[in-house]
Image (cartoon, rainbow, N blue to C red):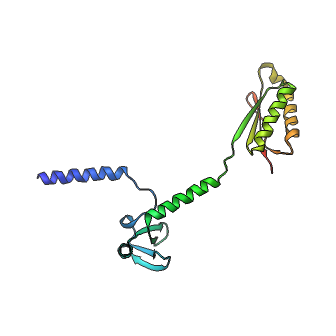
Amino acid sequence: NNNIKKEKRIQQRKKRFFSFTKFRGPRVNHYIRADKIKLIDQNGKMIGVVPVDDGLQKAKDVGLDLVEISPNTSPPICKILDFGKYRYQLQKKKSQEKKKQKTINTKEIRFRPGIDQHDYEIKMKQIRKFLGKKNKVKVTLRFRGREMGHRELGAKLFDKIQEETKQIASVDQKPKMFGRQLVMILNFSN
């Protein structure tokens, strides 16, 4: 009676443990669910369709793992290989792809309709710097109070910005009103 209770507790612990540690990635060895598999040996030679048990035995004989490479095919394709090495290569491949990705940031420059010439030149210098670093630039013009009645000042300012940056940038989003803001997005051009 005591042994039965002990066994039940052990089974419950195992159940709890395995419910928390879900394995992500390809199925390996006895986790492969299919009855028959298409087997590729450690040298890359196609062996053919065999039962899973035979594949596991062949992998065990060589001292390697049976890894499910393509689970969605019928029958699933499995390969005999060193699983630790395989995971390392996948991780390395992923990091290489991540390195190659170029992230494009969006920088924002804010203007006001009555901007002074010197302030305008400084902000244009910033825009050129951001575009030179191949970032997108979001140009925002904020209107306050009675300035909303003179939206044409904003349009003139944006035309001037477009004119000055047309050699190094293209307009991704034409000037558009969002509430009290006029917004335009510039993108670097090659």
- In depth, the one of 118 and 142 nearer the eye is 118
Q: Residue at x 49, y 60 (%)?
A: 88
Residue 138: which quarter of the image?
Answer: top right
The spot of residue 59 in percent (x, y) is: 39, 73
State the image coordinates of residue 73 (x, y, percent, origin top left). 49, 70
Q: Quadrant location of residue 155?
A: top right
| Left or right relative to 98: residue 162 | right
Q: Is residue 92 above or below residue 55?
A: above
Q: Residue at x 47, y 64 (%)?
A: 85
Q: Is residue 111 left or right of residue 89?
A: right
Q: Nearer the viewer, residue 161 or 63?
A: 63
Q: Is residue 181 visible?
A: yes
Q: Which residue ends up furthest to the top in the rendered image?
A: 146
60 on left or right of 141: left
Seen at 84% across and 34% down, the residue is 158
Res 146 quadrant in image: top right
Relative to 43, is 167 above or below? above
Q: Is residue 101 left or right of residue 152?
A: left
Residue 87, percent across and down? 47, 61
The count of marks equals 0
Percent across and percent down for residue 100 are 64, 55
User: Can residue 32 be seen from the camera position used here?
Assistant: no
Relative height, residue 186 to residue 155 (above, below): below
Identify which residue is drawn at 49% across, 79% down.
Answer: 45
